[in-house]
Image: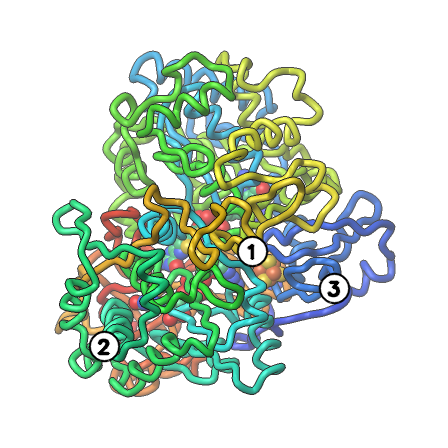
Amino acid sequence: MALTRRDVIRNGLVVVGGTAAAPLFRGTLQDGAARAAGVTTWHKAPCRFCGTGCGVEVGVRDSRVVAVRGDEQSPVNEGLLCAKGFGLAKILYGADRLVRPRIRNSAGQLVDATWDEALGLIASKWTALVAEHGRDSVAMFGSGQWTIPEGYAALKFMKGGIRTNNLEVNARFCMASAVVGYLTTYGIDEPSGCYDDLDLADDFFLWGSNMAEMHPMLFNRILRRRQADAGVRVHNLTTFGHMTNQGADETLVFKPHSDLYLANAMAHVLVNEGLVDTAFIGNHAVFMRNISGTDTAIDLAAYTAFLDAYRPGDVATAVGISAADITRMARLYGDPARKTVSLWTMGMNQHTRGVWINNLVHNLHLLTGKVARPGNGPLSLTGQPSACGTCREVGTFTHRLPSDRVVANAAHRAAVESVWGVPAGTIPSPAESPLTDAMAMFEKLANGSIKSVWINTTNPFQSMPNLDAYLPRIRAADPFIVVSDIYPSRTVDEADVILPSACWVEKEGLFGNTERRTQHFAKLVPAAGDARPDVWQFVEVARRMGFGHLFPAAWDGQLERSLFDEYRQLTLGTHHDLATFDELVASRGLRWPVHDGVETKWRFNAAYDPAVAPGAPDGIEFYGRADKRAVVWARPYEAPPEIPDANYPFWLCTGRVLEHWHTGTMTRRVPELHRAVPEAVCYINDADAARLGVGGGDRITIRSRRGSVQMRAELPCRVSVPPGLVYVPFFDEDYLINKVVLGAVDPQSKQPDYKKCAVSIEKA
Ligand SMILES: Nc1nc2c(c(=O)[nH]1)N[C@H]1C(S)=C(S)[C@@H](COP(=O)(O)OP(=O)(O)OC[C@H]3O[C@@H](n4cnc5c(=O)[nH]c(N)nc54)[C@H](O)[C@@H]3O)O[C@H]1N2
Ligand SMILES: Nc1nc2c(c(=O)[nH]1)N[C@H]1C(S)=C(S)[C@@H](COP(=O)(O)OP(=O)(O)OC[C@H]3O[C@@H](n4cnc5c(=O)[nH]c(N)nc54)[C@H](O)[C@@H]3O)O[C@H]1N2
Ligand code: SF4
Ligand SMILES: [Mo]
């Protein structure tokens, strides 16, 4: 009998639930059998998992990855790896890897096919759909786990070949709010600083970032700094307690969504206690507010008046942190003798006002002049390995083009068309092909206006919010769905064509991490079975649709290098200048902008960044905006769209655990990680559980206005949730918590709020 994927996942299962995997390792990580076999060669590569971008060395023997160790030469992690890095070798060798293309036949059954049949079917379907229903009847949904050449090929194929803006990525679920935060505050995307800041700061403020589990290597760098200097303090601001508490000097639990109050209250203290760096503000900032869609310049007096509504004493109860603590933290931001770094990830971005809270944290750094200087700055942590390098820099969102260009700007389109060698007017404006963000794309699939989607390197039918509002309607509309993946998944279940993909070092690629570091990896081993690189899949379908001019035959055999070389031209002179392919092959990555082979640690700072004009006051210039100034935004508190009430009395927060990557397709096939956390459970406060008559291991029903899921409650739980809040990770395909989660999005970034909605809990 054929194994189902649940059999495969469960076979290795020895339940030691609740045991967390050890977070960090040094040395060579391989099991006994592999060790006995020895390693023939070692090769450098960035880790496949998180946006930290650790360097690993990959041990290869007999065309197989047999070991992984932290790369001592990597400036990111200096030889250490986290538990997921340990699993890297094994993600390639799960028993149920997809190894040949499959096509759903007219009887609805999946049958094996050749690559030629599968690619030919996609090309002929898409050609026919475009002819009959127009170019916006087809779409692609990609990933921050795409390599740079993959994202660039997808962009060229969709916007330069098919000429549609129906290209989106899962990074919309992840860092869209951080992007709009940077763009609205500085006029240019991505952080000014880098990981060196973690070795230099005195105060680390974590704005709802569970770094110990999600960016373990960066947290390790903070702990190293803390150990070296008794004055260093780690402030863990969070809505519930987790592994990060263990390395924090203080954990302050605030109420979900109340960070808008908190950040404004801290700004109130800065402004009213004379802690503002007035010279810095005078030289480098402007104040603005936005009322009904119009950006309006204001002055410091108007901003001070705005902050009057955010006195610490007035908002403390709503925040859940005392006025004294709020004031004390603000004074640390305002202390010129201390260097300050703010860190955040999904707690701030997955927010119906994600952009605003991003702006408010940038404000704290601008008001105090603590930005773009070594040891000082706001540093958003990126989740996926190339959300920065591919989604943001290449520009694989519906509205974007390379290096902060946008499809709405005719000059930007023309610049890209010229490098592509395509006729003027090829890339569609939003008027010609409407912008379609991720949730809009799934809505169009559900209402039938998009008739086919190619989903690649992402698993949205597990990871998207409010699943039941979309998936049944998508099934009824019955679009032609192509899925490229390496394992079966909830999304592969819906596919009409399944394409088996090469993974990580089974192909060549480049990733770009949180600190603007671009890293290259070579193809080290053959792909499983007949799996092929995603970039090859895009190019082959594009050629079959008549877009061969975009991907010349001369590129064959060096597709990744050719795509990168062309893309690099679009970065030069844009403040996003990338290193050459050969420089990246030779190095452990370089941080852009790169000029003459030299990377940039701190942007906007003349001591490091040659783009700053000579004579800029104190050597700082925010050149992203025409006025060369950054914006301090007056952004008010706005209530969340759903709050607990009598029928749905609990907050539900969702996210991750250390041992698993997102929808679990890879980490659940690594026995060590799977055994540590074999299934998703609901983390609940002891007192709440006692009141509901729920004991450890009991099944409970979590219900929202949108859907319900039954799962076990864990007691005592490995996290410490406050009364009135439950926490559920989303890695387990057997418990689809995204049926329960709210689909509301931030109106500016269109990023969904996965972090809070109202639910009821009862014993099942
Ligand atoms: N082990 C592991 N590591 C990963 C990943 C993984 O799947 N597994 N995924 C990577 C990716 S793509 C991402 S995006 C990151 C995610 O990294 P994180 O954002 O750190 O992790 P999550 O578990 O999504 O979110 C939990 C955090 O959300 C905060 N939070 C909840 N509500 C609020 C709120 O209202 N305001 C604020 N300010 N904070 C709030 C909580 O305090 C908690 O610290 O992790 C990356 N690293
Ligand atoms: N409830 C809840 N939901 C969330 C979030 C949350 O905090 N709470 N966070 C959101 C965030 S921040 C993110 S980033 C998303 C992530 O959501 P997804 O992107 O949907 O999750 P992944 O599991 O990373 O999916 C990647 C898929 O690519 C496959 N894959 C791996 N390597 C390759 C390859 O080389 N080629 C191809 N073709 N496929 C490959 C994997 O098997 C997997 O199926 O989830 C979002 N969903
Ligand atoms: S911290 Fe991130 S990049 Fe580093 S080893 Fe762990 S998962 Fe990989
Ligand atoms: Mo993410």
138 up-or-down from 183: above or below: above
Q: Amino acid at mark 2?
A: Asn
Q: Would residue 682 appear left or right of 759 to someone viewing this image?
A: right
| Label 2 – label 3 distance at C-alpha | 54 Å
Quadrant in which the C terminus appears: bottom left
Q: CA distance from mark 1 to mark 3?
A: 40 Å
Query: CB of residue at label 1: within 8 Å of ligand 3?
Result: no
Residue on which disc 3 sits: 29
- Which residue is pictured at 28% across the width and 82% down the height? 321
Which residue is disc 2 drawn over?
272
Residue type at mark 3 is Leu
Q: Nearer the viewer, residue 449 or 749?
A: 749
- Of labels 2 and 1, earlier in sequence is 2
- Residue 16 in view in this figure: yes
Q: Residue at x 47, y 44 (%)?
A: 458
The reply to whether discs 2 and 1 touch (Cβ–Cβ < 8 Å) is: no
Label 2 vs label 3, nearer the camera: 2
* Residue type at numbered disc 1: Ala
For label 1, the residue is 607
Kindly check if marks 2 and 3 are in contact, taking CB atoms under 8 A apart as contact: no
